[in-house]
């Protein structure tokens, strides 16, 4: 079931400023330490997803903080803190979800032309990943 309120730990909604210019499009702004509660060290985006087939994520981070946005289209974000799990629909470009530490996350059910944007508190470091769900559950207790 897709929910509208966040119940897992280490998450939350991040709503950023968006300026709508009618037929000239929309402009959304993400400012480090203002809209996002950390200094942004890395930005990455995910595109070319195959509608209803692709699945991404399936990991947690030990320390990294991230905010994930769906800047085009929609997808379903699965969150699991080791005790509580839930699914959220992301379909507004200016509404991000905090992926705090020790939060198992999965991205799936992508719409046509879906584009994800992620801002992260640190550089890429494979040692910060927990990629095994069993390991995650042990560490999350
Ligand atoms: P991963 O974080 O598992 O992707 P997702 O959560 O979107 O499913 O990363 C996929 C691959 O890309 C993995 O081999 C690591 C590499 N990668 C980098 O080299 N730098 C990065 O900043 C990220 C996010 C991934």
Image (tube, rainbow, N blue to C red):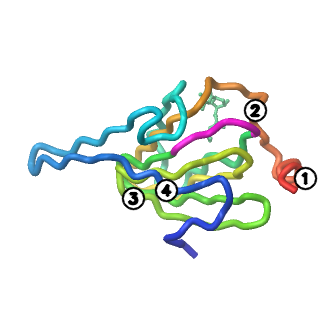
3 and 2 marks in contact (CB < 8 Å): no
Residue 131 point in image, percent of width and height: 78, 42
Q: Looking at the image, is mark 3 or mark 4 nearer the viewer?
A: 4
Q: Looking at the image, is mark 2 or mark 4 nearer the viewer?
A: 4
Mark-to-mark CA distance, 1 and 3: 33 Å
Residue 88 point in image, percent of width and height: 53, 64
Kindly identify which residue carries mark 3: 91
* Magenta range: 62-67
Q: Earlier in the sequence, mark 3 or mark 4?
A: 4
Disc on res. 13: 4
Residue 10 point in image, percent of width and height: 66, 53
Quarter occupied by the C terminus: bottom right
Judged from the image, the quadrant occupied by ligand 1 is top right
Mark-to-mark CA distance, 3 and 4: 13 Å
**10 Å crowding of disc 4: few (<14), some (14-19), many (20+):** some
Q: Earlier in the sequence, mark 1 or mark 3?
A: 3
Kindly identify which residue carries mark 1: 138
């Amino acid at each position: 079931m897709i929910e509208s309120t966040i119940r897992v730990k280490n998450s939350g909604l991040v709503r950023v400023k968006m300026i709508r210019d009618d037929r000239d499009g929309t402009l959304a702004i993400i400012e480090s330490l203002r809209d996002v509660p950390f200094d942004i060290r890395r930005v990455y985006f995910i595109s070319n997803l195959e509608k209803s087939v692709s699945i991404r994520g399936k990991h947690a981070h030990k320390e990294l903080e991230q905010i994930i946005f769906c800047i085009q289209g929609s997808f379903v974000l699965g969150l699991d803190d080791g005790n509580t799990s839930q699914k959220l629909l992301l379909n507004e470009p200016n509404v991000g979800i905090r992926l705090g530490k020790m939060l198992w996350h999965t991205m799936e059910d992508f719409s046509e032309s879906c584009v994800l944007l992620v801002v992260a508190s640190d550089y890429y470091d494979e040692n910060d990943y927990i990629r095994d769900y069993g390991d995650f559950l042990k560490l999350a207790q």
